[in-house]
Amino acid sequence: MAVCARLCGVGQSRSCRRRQRSNQQDQGGSDSDMDEEEGEQIVGARKSETGGRRGGPGGVVAATAGPSDAREYGSGRARTSSGPQHPESLAELPPELLVEIFSLLPGTVLPNVALVCRKFRQILNMETIWRRRCMEEFGMNEDLRKMEAGGVSSQDLYVKRVSLRVKSGRFMKLLPDYENMDYKDVYTHLLHPYRHILGLWQPDIGPYGGLLNVVVDGLFIIGWMYLPPHDPRVEDPMRRRPLFRIHLLDSKKATVECMYGHRGPHKGDIQTVKKDEFSTKCNQTDYHRMPGGRQEEFRTWLEEEWGRTLEEIFHEHMQELILMKFIYTSQYDNCLTYRRIYLPPSMPSDLLEPGLFKGTYGSHGLEIVMLSFHGTSARATKLTGDPNVPAGQLTLDIDLSRPVVLPDLEQQRKIEELSRIIMRIHDEEQREVEQQANGASADGACGGASEGEEMEEDHGASSDSCQLGPSGSSSSSEALPFVLPLGVMARNEVYPRTCRKCFYGTGLIAGHGFTSPERTPGLFVLFDEDRFGFIWLELKSFSLYSRLTDHLEHAHAPSMERFEAMLRNMQSWTS
């Protein structure tokens, strides 16, 4: 406060300002106090004065602030120079400049600025400043009062815009009181208190996990659960389901509502457990029940989750897995704990842009993985999982120092030929791991890095020693013919027939309950910037992955160290 006082020339004591005010009253013509209701008009023309300010013979007054202004808001020294005057303190600047300056400050410091003096406090009541903070800090660009489109008010426009996403129309109820709300209230009572929950989160739902994105959407903060498209349409867009929302029922109080179920919004609660972790609670779980009981709830859930009925799923093992997931996930009743996750950082040397992908996992359907790059390895971590390999586990580990040159199409169709190529690399990699364990290998050896290590090596030399198949450049990005071997099962019959590069890698498999986990060799196939695949040799199956293209705000990792720490924590959550 002392620093602000010196900048503004306010003085160090209240008695000083009292003497200044009494002097102004004696002069008989000092400026009147600005009324609180005139805060919106302060940027406009100055209030004219007929005889209040003592200027020169012609009544000329400085363009910045008169002597009485200086005594009220400044240093208390009247100016006597007849030439152009320059402000001696921040408080003597024109209000329109102060508005611009304050608009550039973070909203968290503005309450402290308002304590400096009454002029600052009145200026900080202006909507212009808080609207800019809402826009720049939270991406909010709705006009609270005047946004109209074809004669439709902002209230109606927002209802229609949101209800298009949710067929049940649950957003139609309990809208905020727009007419008595301003940006300062929205920032102070909604956006700032709940800023710590914006971004990407993973719910703790046992082995199944999930992906929650909390965003500012108009005058709401909404928690959207992201769901993969219906199996096996891996290239379809993601589906979204609202789990909770926060908004202002009046201008001073934020309300949390649970959106789970099919009977509209109802009372909920959000608690911050610790840093990068929060929990939700539903206070009216009866809203989640349906008149037809558990059978109706299961049929509705199955149609939303899989896009089909149980009779349409002929595979008995798949039916068991689906029923198991419904029983496990429905018991939470939207009372969940969430842990923050980040999008992986990108580097110019990355094979492709890291990010989130949807992938096919046999009877388990589509799951979400996170692709990241770590030196000479690419890793895919599960964000959603299943009873065999749960969420948080490293599903794919690709060795980018071991490229594979595919044989011609005729040889590619033979599973034996592909197995021979991959197993030869696998045996070589295992020997190097054993040598490193015995301390007999050099730091620059080809491949063999353990999961927690980052090996630096001569990429060109390792490529020469690891290439197999016909001669050719493994670094070429031109399209190469590709076909799945006969006998390899693919959930999606439509897969790319050309690829750019192939690499040796391993995939994680396990028994039910994540028992006897092991890494099995396979082939990583890069099709283009948005698609890749993996051939699981032991399972004789193929997984196709397609990029998640949704724009995700507040989700990028602050640093590579924070991202890698998050990956380690994710594995510990389910181990």
Image (tube, helix red, strand yellow):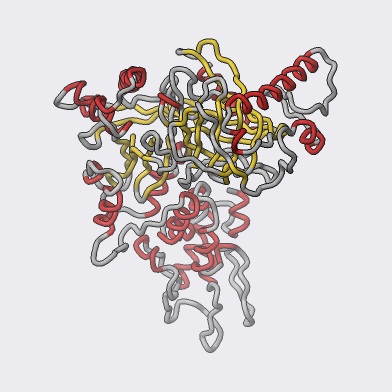
One can see residue 258 in this view: no
Q: Residue at x 66, y 47 (%)?
A: 477
Q: How many marks?
A: 0
Picture residue at 40% right of the left edge, 24% below the top: 363
Q: Which quadrant of the figure has residue 372?
A: top right
Placement of 567 over or under 355, stated as above or below: above
Q: Is residue 525 left or right of residue 191?
A: right
x%, y% of residue 517? 55, 14
Q: Is residue 85 visible?
A: yes
Q: Tell which residue pokes out farthest to the left in this image.
A: 291
In the rendered image, the residue lying farthest to the bottom is 58
> Is residue 380 depicted above or below 25 in this figure?
above
Q: Residue 224 at what x, y percent from top left?
A: 38, 38
Image point (67%, 22%), residue name: 423
Q: Nearer the viewer, residue 446 or 238?
A: 446
Question: Which residue is most to the top?
Answer: 516
Asked whether 160 or 372 is in front, the reply is: 372
Instruction: Establish if 271 lies above or below 439.
Output: below
Among the 4 quarters of the image, the one containing residue 248: top left
Residue at 27% x, 26% y is 283
- How far from the left and from the top, in percent, is residue 230? 36, 35
Where's residue 117, x and y in %? 50, 56
